Image (cartoon, rainbow, N blue to C red):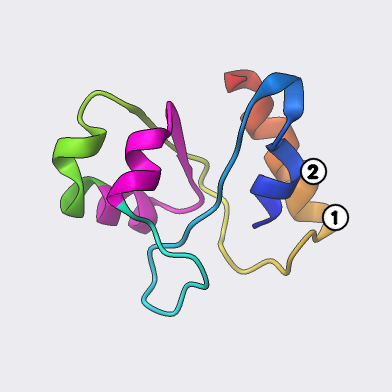
């Protein structure tokens, strides 16, 4: 959610957030993955779940693991700083 808020509209990019956990407010779907040009994951387990469950959809897409622990609160200053420093090199 934080990444979507930070990057949606940034230099003309569109961003959406979705989770891989069963209790995620917005879950990853084939439609969201098909829509995306690049897919950023916070943790390796998120990337692994996406690659395993949706291998056909993400086969030709950039799936990037940021290696950021997924335990920050929404719009946490430290999280925002990490996301901005790590994602900006790809945009």
Contact check, label 1 and label 2, Cβ < 8 Å: yes
The residue pinned by badge 1 equals 77
Is residue 40 rendered magenta in the image? yes
Looking at the rendering, the stretch of residues picked out in magenta corresponds to 30-50
Q: State the CA–CA distance, disc 1 to disc 2.
A: 6 Å
Q: In front here: 41 or 37?
A: 37
* Rendered view: 10 above or below 16: above
Look at the image and say whether residue 45 sits in the magenta stretch: yes
Q: Which of the 4 quarters of the picture holds residue 14?
A: top right
Q: Quadrant of residue 64?
A: top left
What residue is at 66 percent from the left and 47 percent from the top? 3
Q: Does residue 72 appear to the left or right of 27 in the view shown?
A: right
Q: Main secondary structure of the magenta part?
A: helix
The residue shown at (45%, 53%) is 43
User: 83 or 8: nearer the eye?
Assistant: 8
Q: Secondary structure at mark 1?
A: helix
Quadrant location, the N terminus: bottom right
Residue highlighted by disc 2: 81
Residue depicted at x 45% and y 62%:
19
Q: Pointer 1: residues within 10 angstroms few (<14), some, or many (20+)?
A: few
Question: Residue 15's x, y, as percent?
Answer: 60, 39
Q: Position of residue 12 (x, y in %)?
A: 70, 21
């Amino acid at each position: 959610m934080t990444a979507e808020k930070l990057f949606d509209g940034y230099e003309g990019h569109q961003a959406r957030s979705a989770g891989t956990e069963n209790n995620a407010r917005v879950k990853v779907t084939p439609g969201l993955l098909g829509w995306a040009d690049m897919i950023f994951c916070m943790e390796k387990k998120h990337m692994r779940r996406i690659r395993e469950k949706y291998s056909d959809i993400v086969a030709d897409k950039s799936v990037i693991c940021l290696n950021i622990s997924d335990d920050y609160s929404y719009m946490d200053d430290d999280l925002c700083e990490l996301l901005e420093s790590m994602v900006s090199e790809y945009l």
